[in-house]
Image (spheres, rainbow, N blue to C red):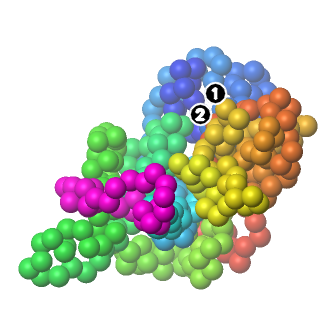
């Protein structure tokens, strides 16, 4: 795997090898730079102009309902692999909000008067659950464009059947079609200089069979054979040649937040409802990567004048009785990132050309 390189003005340059990155750091010509959990190096001195000459960097995106995969590759090597989860909890949050809002209309408490859903009749409306899923793809692309000079994006094209003669049904019946249209418009607006390619799923399978790659059936595993095998094939299709795979990957988990929730749904003792929700803990953003007693973690919720910290690797809570002055905030983030190195796999590298 190659290492992303940034110049003195944080402009992404063409990635370099791990060996050269270590040499630049050792000779004090570069320093270690973490971009939201992804390892990079930042040049301290101006390098030769040859580094400005780029090869094509292709980003392959394999979409999914539970897991999604991203691979960035050039003609020579794979730069990095990423596997993420999806924000599948948004739909349940919206339904819970609707139930609580409707129940308040039968009690003697302030509530919003019943009115028709104005957003439902808005042109080009995107449901919250669909919008959040496709926004995650845009956020990952935004993260990668900050550290890599990507020139092309190849995304697996998904489709759903439509009904003949029913224009209104076909325009908004499927979250897939609505999400694709939203993604295309946002991508062309944000990245007009990057070429967008769409590849059908059966074309990806043909390339996978041609390369004799075997795809794992364990869809929830964070391994290269589960989803990154398809994103790698998408890169090869866009480049028009075969690239030697790299089995290591970054695991990125989007954190679940309870936004705009002031208190718990059910009251506790003496009818009191404890505070719950929000994205801020004692003035700090939840999910921020922190250092506590020499160990790394991320910031969780709050109780009274204490905060909780969680493990970056497992996400489990380490402690919930931490003073705010005992932690050091490294950077703000809404994602949990960890690197999974190349593991022993039944995929043998001598099969790769």
Residue 207: give x, y in percent of width and height: 44, 74
Q: Mark 1 = which residue?
A: 42
Residue at the outermost right position: 293
Asked whether 127 or 6 is in front, the reply is: 127
Which residue is depicted at the point 86% across and 45% down?
A: 321
**Does the stretch in magenta take in 116?**
yes
Q: Which residues are magenta?
A: 102-130
Whole-angstrom CA distance, mark 2 to mark 1, is 6 Å
Does 91 appear above or below 210? above
Judged left or right of residue 9, residue 2 is: right
The crowding category of the residue bearing disc 1, from other C-alpha atoms within 10 Å (few below 14, some 14 to 19, many at least 20), is many
Which residue is depicted at the point 48% across and 47% down?
A: 139
Label 1 element class: strand
Judged left or right of residue 76, residue 197 is: left
Q: Mark 2 = which residue?
A: 5
Residue 12: give x, y in percent of width and height: 51, 32
Judged left or right of residue 5, residue 318 is: right
Does 289 appear above or below 108? above
Whether residue 227 is visible, yes or no, is yes
Residue 134: give x, y in percent of width and height: 41, 57
Does 183 appear above or below 293? below
Residue 44: give x, y in percent of width and height: 65, 19
Res 351 → quadrant: bottom right
Res 307 → quadrant: top right
The crowding category of the residue bearing disc 2, from other C-alpha atoms within 10 Å (few below 14, some 14 to 19, many at least 20), is many
């Amino acid at each position: 795997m190659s290492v992303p390189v940034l110049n003195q003005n944080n402009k992404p340059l063409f990635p370099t090898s791990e060996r050269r990155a270590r040499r630049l750091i050792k000779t004090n010509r570069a320093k270690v730079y973490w971009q939201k959990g992804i390892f990079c190096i930042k040049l301290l001195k101006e390098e030769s102009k040859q580094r400005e000459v780029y090869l094509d960097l292709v980003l392959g995106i394999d979409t999914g309902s539970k897991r999604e995969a991203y691979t960035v590759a050039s003609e020579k090597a794979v730069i990095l692999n990423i596997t993420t989860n999806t924000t599948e909890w948004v739909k349940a949050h919206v339904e819970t909000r609707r139930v609580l809002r409707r129940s308040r209309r039968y009690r003697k408490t302030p509530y919003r008067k019943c009115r028709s859903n104005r957003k439902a009749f808005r042109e080009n409306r995107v449901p919250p659950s669909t919008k959040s899923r496709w926004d995650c793809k845009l956020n990952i692309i935004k993260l990668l464009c900050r550290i890599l000079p990507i020139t092309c994006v190849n995304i697996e094209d998904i489709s759903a059947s439509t009904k003949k003669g029913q224009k209104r049904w076909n325009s908004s019946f499927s979250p897939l079609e609505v999400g694709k249209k939203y993604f295309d418009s946002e991508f062309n607006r944000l990245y007009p200089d990057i070429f967008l390619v769409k590849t059908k799923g059966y074309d990806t399978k043909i390339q996978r069979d041609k390369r004799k790659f075997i795809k794992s059936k364990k869809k929830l595993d964070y391994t290269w054979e589960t989803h990154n095998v398809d994103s790698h094939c998408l890169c090869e299709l866009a480049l028009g040649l075969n690239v030697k795979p790299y089995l290591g990957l970054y695991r990125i988990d989007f954190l679940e937040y309870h936004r705009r929730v002031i208190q718990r749904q059910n009251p506790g003792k003496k009818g009191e409802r404890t505070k719950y929700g929000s994205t801020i803990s004692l003035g700090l953003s939840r999910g921020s990567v922190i250092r506590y007693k020499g160990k790394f973690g991320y910031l969780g919720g709050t109780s009274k004048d204490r905060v909780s910290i969680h493990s970056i690797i497992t996400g489990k809570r380490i402690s919930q009785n931490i003073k705010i002055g005992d932690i050091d905030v490294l950077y703000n983030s809404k994602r949990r990132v960890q690197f999974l190195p190349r593991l022993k796999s039944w995929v043998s590298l001598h099969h790769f050309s």
